Image (cartoon, grey):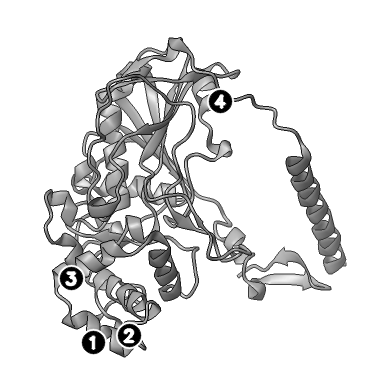
Amino acid sequence: MKYLIRFISGIILVLVVVAGAAYAYLAPESKPAPVASNNTLINLDTGDIIGYQNSLGASVWRGIPFAQPPVGDLRWRAPRPPAPWQHPRQMLEAGPDCAHQANNTSPEKNLINGSEDCLYLNVFAPENAKDRPVMFWIHGGANNGGTSNHPWLDGSQLASQFDVVVVSINYRLSAFGWLSHPALRTNAKLPEDKSSNFGTLDQIAGLKWVQRNIAQFGGDASRVTIFGESAGGWNVMALMASPLATDLFHGAIVQSGGLDIEPITRAENFIEDEGHEHSSREFINQLLVAEGRATNREAAKKLQSSMTVHDLADYLRSKTTAEVFRAFRSETGGKVFGNLDLIGDGIVLPQAIASKQLFADPANYNAVPVILGTNRDEMKLFLSFSPDQVDSFMGIPIAIKNS
C-alpha cells in the first residue's frame, strides 16, 4: 500500500509538472517591453540613468554597472569602479548573468551561460520613495551558478508591498569567483588583488555602491539589510565575517546558510601537499592535460612546477571562459552542485579560525541583528539527483529516501 500511494503521488506530481511546463511554453508573453519613464531619472556618481515604472507600482532600474568588467587583466582581481558616462543611460534590461556552466542534470552539460562581463545590479523602489530601508539580495546557486536576473527574483513586489528599496546583485561565480594561487597575487595594484574571494569582493563593491548612491533612489544608506538563500545565505555570513564589509550593512537575514572557511593551503596545494582534490594547482594540472601540454597528472605537475609565477599568471588569464570551465568541471569530477569554498585569505576572510570560534565572539565579526532560518530537509532536493537516494517504481521516481 505504501508503494502504491507513493506511485500515485509520483504520477500526480509528474502530471502537474508536465502541465505547468506546457502552459509556460504555450502561454503568450503577457509582459510588454518596459518603457523609459522620465520620472525615474537618477543622478549616480558615475552618470545619469533612467528606468521605468511597472504595473506593481515600483520604479525599476536594471543592469546598472557597479564595477568595471572583470576581464583581461582584471580577471582574478578586485573589482574596479565603473567608468563614468556623460549622457543619460536607459537601464531597462538586466545585464548578463555571471558565467556559469550548465549543471550535471542538463542534456547540454558543456553549455556555458552568461558572461565574465557581469558586474551589474538591479534596483526596485516604491514610487516616491524617501529614506526607505534597503534590502540587498544575494542570490544562491552554490557559488557555481545562479543569477539575480531570474524572473522569480524580481524585487518589484517586495518593494511596492513593503515600502523598501530592493537591490539585487550579480557576482563572479565558480573558478572566476573563488580561486587562490600565488601566481594570481603577482603584480597586484591593490591589497585586495591578493585576495582569493573575488565573488565576495564583488558583493562588497555592490554594498559600497549602495552607500554612495542609494539615497538617490529613496533608500536610507544607514538601514541596509543583506539577505540571501542557500549559497546566498553563506555569502551573507561571509560578509558578516569580513573586515572589509564593516559598516556597509546593518542587519542580516540568512536563509538556509552556513559558513565554512577553507585554509589557503588546502585551496592551493597539490593533493599530496595537503591540498584538496580541486585546489588551484590541481585545476592547473587539468588545464595542462586538457590542452595537450601534459599527458597525465604527473607530467602536468612537473611542468607546472617548472613555470614561474609570472608565466602561470599569464597562462591562467589567457584561457577562454570555456577552457576554464572544462578544466574546472573535470577536476571536480563533473560536479556542479555543492558550495564552492570560501577561502581564509587573511584579506577578505580571516585565516586559521573555525566558523564556530569566529562567531563565538562579537569582536571577531560584524555583529548586526540577524534572522537565521533553516529547513528540516535542507538537502532533499539535491538527493533527488542521485539514483541511490531515490525509490522508484517501474523506473519512475516516486520518493526520496530518508538518509
Reading the chain from its start, which is encountered first: label 2 or label 3? 2
Residue under numbered circle 2:
294
Q: CA distance from mark 4 to mark 3?
A: 50 Å
Residue under numbered circle 1:
302
Q: Are marks 1 and 2 in contact (CB under 8 Å)?
A: yes
Q: In the picture shown, does residue 344 fall above or below 216? A: below
Q: CA distance from mark 2 to mark 3?
A: 16 Å
Quadrant where the N terminus sits is bottom right
Count numbered badges in the picture: 4
Name the residue type under label 4. Gln
Residue located 55% across and 16% down the image = 57
Q: Residue 141: percent from the left, percent from the top?
A: 48, 53
Q: In the picture shown, does residue 276 fall above or below 175? A: below
Of the two numbered discs 1 and 3 in the rendering, the one whose residue sits closer to the viewer: 3
Q: CA distance from mark 2 to mark 4?
A: 54 Å
Q: Are marks 2 and 3 in contact (CB under 8 Å)?
A: no
Q: CA distance from mark 1 to mark 4?
A: 56 Å
Residue under numbered circle 3:
311
In the displayed structure image, the side of residue 234 where residue 195 appears, left or right:
left
Q: In the picture shown, does residue 354 fall above or below 331? A: above
In the displayed structure image, the side of residue 89 where residue 72 appears, left or right:
left
Residue located 23% across and 80% down the image = 304
Q: Is residue 360 visible?
A: no
Image quarter of residue 249: top left
Secondary structure under tag 2 reads loop
Name the residue type under label 2. Ala
Secondary structure under tag 1 reads helix
Residue under numbered circle 4:
157
Reading the chain from its start, which is encountered first: label 4 or label 3? 4
Of the two numbered discs 1 and 4 in the rendering, the one whose residue sits closer to the viewer: 1
